[in-house]
Image: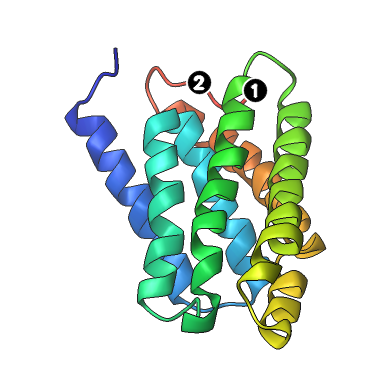
C-alpha cells in the first residue's frame, strides 16, 4: 500500500517544480533533457515510482501547454510521456540489479521506444518536414540525455542521501 504523507507530497511538489523550471529556462535540448531525466530518476529514488511517474507525465504536457513543444509537434506529446514512463519503470523493475545496468537499459529502452514511435507511428500523422525535425530531436540525442540524466541522478542522489532520512540512494 502506498504511503502518502506530507514529506512525499512536499518532495513531489519540489521535484515537479524543479523539472518545470528547468524546462521553462529554455536551455538547449541536451541540457534540458539531461536535467529533466535526472529529476525523474531522483524522484524515483527519493519518493517512489508512482510520484516519479506523475512527474514524468506532467512535464511533457506542461511543455506543450507553455509552447516549448510547438503545436505541430502535439502528436509527439503522448509518446514523450510514455518514454518517460519507460525510463522510470525499467529502472524500477531492475532495482535489484547494478545501478549502471539499470540506467543503461532504461536509457536504451526510452531511446528505442521513441525511435519506433517516431519512425513507425508519427510518420503517419505528421507531414514530412515536421517528421524530419521530430526524428532529429528524438534520435540519438534522447539516448544521450537519458544516459547523462541517469548518471547525474546517481551522483545527486548519493550526495542527498545523508539528508533524506530512511530513503536509500540509487544503488
Relative to the observer, which residue lies in front, 128 or 138? 128
x, y percentage for residue 46?
44, 31
Give how far across and how far down residue 97 sits, in percent: 72, 16
Task: State yes or no: discs 2 and 1 in contact (Cβ < 8 Å).
Answer: yes
Instruction: Point out the residue furthest to the right here.
Output: 140
Q: Position of residue 19 (x, y in %)?
A: 44, 58
Residue 168 numbered tag: 2
Please tell me which residue is depicted at 75% across the width and 71% down the height of the picture: 135
Q: The C terminus appears in which quarter of the rendering?
A: top right
**Mark 1 packing: few (<14 Cα in 10 Å), some, or many (20+)?**
some
The furthest residue to the left: 6
Whether residue 52 is visible, yes or no, is yes
Left or right: 164 in relation to 69: left
| Residue at 66% across, 83% down | 127
Q: Quadrant of residue 34?
A: bottom right
Q: CA distance from mark 2 to mark 1?
A: 8 Å
Residue under pointer 1? 171
Residue at the spot x=53%, y=41% of the render?
A: 85
Q: Secondary structure at mark 2?
A: loop
Amino acid at each position: 500500500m502506498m504511503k502518502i504523507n506530507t514529506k512525499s507530497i512536499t518532495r513531489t511538489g519540489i521535484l515537479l517544480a524543479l523539472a518545470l523550471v528547468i524546462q521553462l529556462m529554455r536551455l538547449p535540448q541536451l541540457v534540458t533533457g539531461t536535467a529533466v531525466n535526472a529529476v525523474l530518476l531522483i524522484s524515483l529514488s527519493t519518493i517512489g515510482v508512482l510520484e516519479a511517474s506523475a512527474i514524468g507525465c506532467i512535464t511533457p504536457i506542461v511543455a506543450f501547454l507553455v509552447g516549448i513543444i510547438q503545436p505541430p509537434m502535439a502528436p509527439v506529446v503522448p509518446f514523450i510521456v510514455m518514454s518517460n514512463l519507460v525510463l522510470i519503470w525499467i529502472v524500477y523493475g531492475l532495482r535489484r540489479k547494478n545501478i549502471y545496468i539499470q540506467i543503461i537499459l532504461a536509457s536504451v529502452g526510452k531511446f528505442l521506444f521513441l525511435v519506433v514511435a517516431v519512425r513507425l507511428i508519427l510518420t503517419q500523422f505528421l507531414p514530412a518536414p515536421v517528421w524530419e525535425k521530430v526524428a532529429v530531436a528524438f534520435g540519438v540525442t534522447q539516448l544521450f540525455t537519458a544516459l547523462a540524466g541517469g548518471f547525474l541522478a546517481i551522483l545527486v542522489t548519493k550526495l542527498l542521501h545523508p539528508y533524506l532520512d530512511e530513503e536509500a540512494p540509487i544503488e
